């Protein structure tokens, strides 16, 4: 965040770094001032003109939805549909920069309610360090995971037949969290046995007012299931409904360790 509190457009910053284009070079090739590019980076909510967005993304070799998702959704979304920022046919199609940006930008709430939460440790650079910094800064960080010895876990393993089993993925998460034990602001729970099927079938990852939601398909692993990126706009919308679902599971869960 900037000194004025606006969230940085880290997706734009990262795309520029990957393309090895600095603000002056981007400004020259798009036909705007360096100050304009610096403002685009400094304020995620600032929306350049459509032509400038198009030209910037062409220079950087990225899709506009990655840098300015709100510009795309605002053209076609009305009412409650505005909460849907983007949808992906596969969770793995969601850029890693989106996951990293949402985790790093969260200031009050990170709630990871996937059944294993395993992929965060490989998807987000220095994820353990991020968790530590978030908790130490006063952000509430919660993990809701399935019981590695539970019946639903065993049955899910039979369905997936994955080399890295569900119980192994859960235990990897628990091992990482054990290294962070005693950290104020960090909480971990197992979902209740009565909720395990619902938990295994729907992952909700919350970052302040953004959420990434994966409804798990019957016989595929999580990264091959669809994903919805939601951003809260109004009470009782899609964001709130998924949030309330996992809060209910959390309330019946049991503390780990």
Image: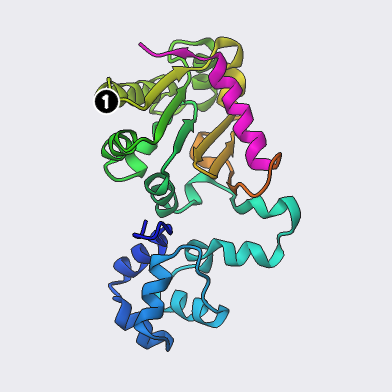
Magenta highlight: main SS: helix
Report the number of numbered marks.
1
152 horizontally vs 6: left or right: right
101 falls in the magenta region:
no
Extent of the magenta region: 238-257
* Residue shown at the point (64%, 51%) measured from the top left: 84
In the rendered image, the quadrant that contains the N terminus is bottom left
Q: Quadrant of the C terminus?
A: top left
Whether residue 69 sits left or right of residue 240 in the image: it is left
Give percent across and percent down for residue 34.
Answer: 35, 82
Residue 110, given in percent of the width and then of the height, sits at 44, 36
The secondary structure type at the circle numbered 1 is: loop
The percent coordinates of residue 201 (x first, y second) are 60, 27
Residue that badge 1 annotates: 180
Residue at the spot 61% in from the left edge and 47% down from the top edge: 232
Where residue 241 sits, quadrant-wise, is: top right
């Amino acid at each position: 965040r900037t000194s004025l509190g606006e969230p940085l457009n880290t997706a734009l910053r990262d795309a520029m770094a990957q393309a090895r284009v600095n603000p002056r070079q981007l400004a020259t090739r798009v036909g705007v001032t360096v100050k304009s590019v610096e403002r685009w980076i400094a304020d995620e909510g600032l929306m350049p003109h459509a032509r400038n967005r198009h030209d910037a993304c062409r220079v950087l070799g990225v899709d506009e939805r990655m840098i300015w998702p709100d510009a795309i959704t605002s053209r076609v979304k009305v009412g409650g549909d505005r909460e849907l920022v983007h949808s992906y046919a596969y969770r793995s199609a969601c850029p890693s920069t989106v996951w990293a940006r949402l985790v790093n930008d969260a200031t009050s709430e990170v709630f990871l309610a996937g059944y294993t939460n395993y992929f965060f440790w490989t998807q987000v650079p220095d994820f353990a360090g991020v968790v530590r910094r978030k908790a130490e800064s006063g952000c509430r960080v919660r993990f809701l995971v399935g019981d590695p010895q539970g019946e639903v876990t065993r049955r899910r393993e039979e369905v997936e037949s994955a080399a890295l089993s569900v119980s192994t993925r859960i235990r990897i998460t628990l091992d990482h969290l054990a290294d962070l034990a005693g950290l104020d602001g960090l909480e971990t729970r197992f979902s209740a046995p009565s909720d395990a099927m619902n938990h295994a079938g729907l992952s909700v990852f919350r970052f302040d007012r953004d959420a990434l939601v994966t409804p798990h398909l019957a016989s595929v692993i999580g990264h091959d299931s669809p994903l919805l990126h939601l951003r809260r706009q109004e009470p009782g919308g899609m964001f709130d409904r998924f949030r309330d679902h996992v809060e209910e599971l959390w309330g019946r869960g049991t503390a780990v360790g």
